[in-house]
Image (tube, rainbow, N blue to C red):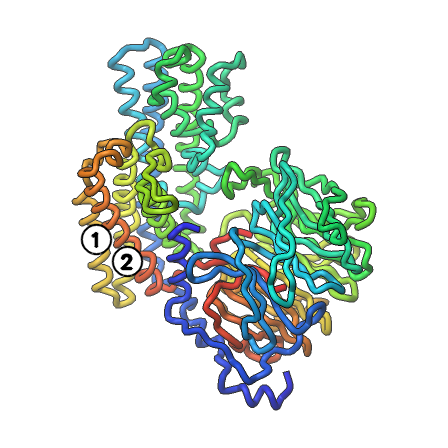
């Protein structure tokens, strides 16, 4: 640029240093991460315990199938799945290894790959082995595959329904894969402690993971199936866990997980920044969303087909939406955490 | 686009008034083709997408609407056309009149293939080379189109690798340089990275007429996804990585090709941390020995000396991503918050304009 022009325009030029305040280091004391690490550890430990019991229950059921064992197995799937929902928000660190998060829960699944892969595996002559599961991709390796085997209505009335030998082999092998992954994850998170505590960037990673979880919750797990986006049609199959009718229970578990494992140290960070009122509002909003949880044990299909139930669902959606705004807009800005148009793209 | 994205965009723009600085010829001419204007894919505040061009005063010339978010593009030499590619998985490319933004052609990816966001023309403007993926087998290719025959697909060059991204032409006019990210993805699996343990990123040099691979150079670590590159008119090649390992590992993110190997450039720990293991654009200034790189993840742009790798300047620019060389020796940086920032080795970063849109990744 010519010096004359530069001088002429100088008054209009903003120094970027002033614009960069929003990206200033947001790390306070190490205390937030020091609190988050054991909190997330306890959630991973619970997941390891619940998936281990699921593997044992699956073996028990397949060895001697009985109605009571089947019921216990289904309940154990729910318990393990909810343990996963509670810690599903963590999207960084060891859970990134080998796409573990995707192995636990392949979702969204618009092409119904879970059903397609299950159809193939339960009918093929191929022996179901740990290696086969290892090679079969993330749609086979986690909770949705087990959910299909246990709860899918057409499958459960077909000739390959559990406890058919081949389907049982698939069930038990996938549960063992899941238990093994959970055990590994729990151990890896333990070893992750030192880099997690020593790396400032993990504070933003942790906050962003909660922000992303809330956004997914609001938009993809509630708004879309409720018909609040796109073509406006209600569609229960857009959310997760519709086969087992636990979509709403899993939403509740995700919120509860955030409240238990993320919120305490997050609020502390806000308070350290002088954002006392905002911290209190977020705490109250979490309580409100969880207290007002409507008929959470009912399947999404039922909640969407009944207008009274739908109104309650709308109330929940508003609660979650307000919570997301408080955390993702107000608190994140206060803490200098920005999820950008480009930075969240990945190319 | 879903509402979450719109909210994200609105949040990103909150508090920023639209600003155009008329009356001042604020930007020097751009280096290279079409020096009087810049273009880029954009997100708009209403949640829709477009491709936009702006002039040297930072004033928008046109915004051409597109259905799907685009990523980057290229200028057709000698002819007043721009080509923009949809974001990965890109199912089509748009050929635009560079003066008006009018769409001249809309070319869909071939069956079983998708574009990945980048392309480059032959020096005579006839052949368009677009990086693409055959997504079922996961094979990276260069798809060749004849611009003189309404962008008919005429050839395919095999890359013998996974995940090509940016492609550019060596100043010899004969050699294509391709950044092979190494990451296997599939449209059925969203943006899931399917092969982080076995990825094999590389810089590939290829004869643009025969498709013969002349050389394949690999980063020091297999998880350094070599995604972007640029070539100085002298022939010096610079590449940029996105590290796929844990955040607390902070390996080199930039390298230059020297004596048939990638000589990696690592800055001090603080700068490495500021770059967040992720570079979105790298540009070697054609008029000097300066190279600029931008990291939206770290919200940081750097300028360094190309020949030595010495860090010369660093600026904090939230969500910065696009980089272009300005005539006179500086760089222009664009951000997802609508900012255009002038940045060089010898002067502090200066905000040139803030527009009510979100610059997407690359400045063309």
The total of numbered circles placed on residues is: 2
Label 2: chain letter: A
- Residue B272: tell me if it is visible: no
Q: In this view, does B312 lie above or below B137?
A: below
Is A64 placed above or below B246 here?
A: above
In the image, residue B168 lies at what x, y percent? 71, 56
Q: Residue at x 54, y 71 (%)?
A: B60
Task: Look at 34% across and 27% down and name the residue there.
Answer: A243
Q: Label 1's element? A: helix
- Residue A334 tag number: none
Q: Which residue is drawn at 31% across and 62% down?
A: A330
Looking at the image, can residue A19 be seen? yes
The residue indicated by pointer 1 is: A285
Residue B288: name its quadrant: bottom right
Secondary element type, mark 2: helix
Residue nearer the viewer, A276 or B140: B140
Mark 2, residue position: A326
Q: Which of B216 and A6 is in front in this view?
A: A6
A239 or A10, which lies in front? A239
Give the class, few, some or many, for how many residues have Cα within 10 Å of label 1's Cα (few <14, many ≥20): some
Return the x and y of residue A26 as percentages of the image width and height.
Answer: 38, 64
The relative height of residue B190 versus residue A182 in the rendered view (above or below) is below
Which numbered disc flags the more N-terminal residue, 1 or 2? Answer: 1
Front-most of A205 and B285?
A: B285
Q: Is residue B16 left or right of residue A15?
A: left
Provide residue B219's location: percent of width, then percent of height. Answer: 67, 50
Q: How far apart are marks 1 and 2 (CA)?
A: 9 Å
The reply to whether callout 1 and callout 2 are in contact (CB within 8 Å) is yes
Chain of the residue where label 1 is placed in the rendered structure: A
User: Label 2: few (<14), some or many (≥20) within 10 Å?
Assistant: some
Looking at the image, which residue is at 61% across and 43% down? B114
**Horizontal relation, residue B260 to residue A226: left or right:** right
């Amino acid at each position: 640029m010519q010096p004359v022009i530069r001088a002429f325009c100088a008054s209009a030029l903003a120094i970027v240093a002033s614009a960069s305040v929003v990206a200033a280091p947001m790390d306070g004391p190490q205390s937030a991460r020091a609190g988050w690490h054991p909190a997330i550890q306890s959630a991973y430990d619970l997941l390891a315990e619940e998936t281990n019991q699921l593997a044992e229950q699956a073996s028990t059921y397949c060895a001697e199938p009985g109605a009571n064992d089947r019921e216990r197995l289904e309940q154990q799937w729910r318990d393990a799945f909810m343990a996963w929902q509670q810690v599903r928000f963590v999207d960084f660190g060891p859970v990134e290894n080998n796409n573990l998060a995707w192995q636990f829960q392949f979702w969204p699944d618009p092409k119904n790959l879970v059903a397609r892969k299950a159809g193939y595996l339960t009918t093929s002559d191929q022996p179901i082995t740990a290696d086969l599961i290892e090679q079969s991709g993330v749609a086979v390796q986690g909770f949705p595959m087990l959910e299909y085997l246990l709860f899918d209505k057409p499958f459960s009335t077909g000739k390959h329904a559990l406890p058919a030998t081949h389907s049982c082999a698939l069930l038990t092998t996938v549960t063992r894969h899941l238990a093994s992954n959970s055990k590994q994850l729990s151990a890896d998170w333990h070893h992750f402690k030192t880099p997690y505590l020593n790396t400032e960037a993990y504070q933003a990673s942790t906050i962003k993971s909660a922000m992303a979880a809330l956004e997914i919750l609001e938009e993809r797990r509630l708004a879309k199936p409720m018909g609040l986006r796109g073509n406006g049609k209600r569609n229960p199959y857009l959310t997760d866990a519709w086969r087992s009718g636990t979509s709403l229970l899993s939403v509740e578990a995700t919120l509860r997980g955030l409240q238990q494992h993320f919120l305490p140290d997050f609020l502390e960070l806000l308070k350290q920044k002088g954002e006392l009122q905002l911290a209190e509002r977020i705490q109250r909003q979490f309580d409100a969303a969880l207290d007002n949880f409507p008929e959470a044990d009912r399947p999404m299909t039922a909640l969407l087909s009944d207008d009274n139930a739908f109104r309650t669902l709308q109330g929940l959606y508003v609660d979650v939406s307000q919570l997301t705004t408080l955390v993702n807009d107000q608190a994140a800005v206060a803490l200098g955490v920005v999820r950008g148009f480009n930075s969240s793209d990945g190319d | 686009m879903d509402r979450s994205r719109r909210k994200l965009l609105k949040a990103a723009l909150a508090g920023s008034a639209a600003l155009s600085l008329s009356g001042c010829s604020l930007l020097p001419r751009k280096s290279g083709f079409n020096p009087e204007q810049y273009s880029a894919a954009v997100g708009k505040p209403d949640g829709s997408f477009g491709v936009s061009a702006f002039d040297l005063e930072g004033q928008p010339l046109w915004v051409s609407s597109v259905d799907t978010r685009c990523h980057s593009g290229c200028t057709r030499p000698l002819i007043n056309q721009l080509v923009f590619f949809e974001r990965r998985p890109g199912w089509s490319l748009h050929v635009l009149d560079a003066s008006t933004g009018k769409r001249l052609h809309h070319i869909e990816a071939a069956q079983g293939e998708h574009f990945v966001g980048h392309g480059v023309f032959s020096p005579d403007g006839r052949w368009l080379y677009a990086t693409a993926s055959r997504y079922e087998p996961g094979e990276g290719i260069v798809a060749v189109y004849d611009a003189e025959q309404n962008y008919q697909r005429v050839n395919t060059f095999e890359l013998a690798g996974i995940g090509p991204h940016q492609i550019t032409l060596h100043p010899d006019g004969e050699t294509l340089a391709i950044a092979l990210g190494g990451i296997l993805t599939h449209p059925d699996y969203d943006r899931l990275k399917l092969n982080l343990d076995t990825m094999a990123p590389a810089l590939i040099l290829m004869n643009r007429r025969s498709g013969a691979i002349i050389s394949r150079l690999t980063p020091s670590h297999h998880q350094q996804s070599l995604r972007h590159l640029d070539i100085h008119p002298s022939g010096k090649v610079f590449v940029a990585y996105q590290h796929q390992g844990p955040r607390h590992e902070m390996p080199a993110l930039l390298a230059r090709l020297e004596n048939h190997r990638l000589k990696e450039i690592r800055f001090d720990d603080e700068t490495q941390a500021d770059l967040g293991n992720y570079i979105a654009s790298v540009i070697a200034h054609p008029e000097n020995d300066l190279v600029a790189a931008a990291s939206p993840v770290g919200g940081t742009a750097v300028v360094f000396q190309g020949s030595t790798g010495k860090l010369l300047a660093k600026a904090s620019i939230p969500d910065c991503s696009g980089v272009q060389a300005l005539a006179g020796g500086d760089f222009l940086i664009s951000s997802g918050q609508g900012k255009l920032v002038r940045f060089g080795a010898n002067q502090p970063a200066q905000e040139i304009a803030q527009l009510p849109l979100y610059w997407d990744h690359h400045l063309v």
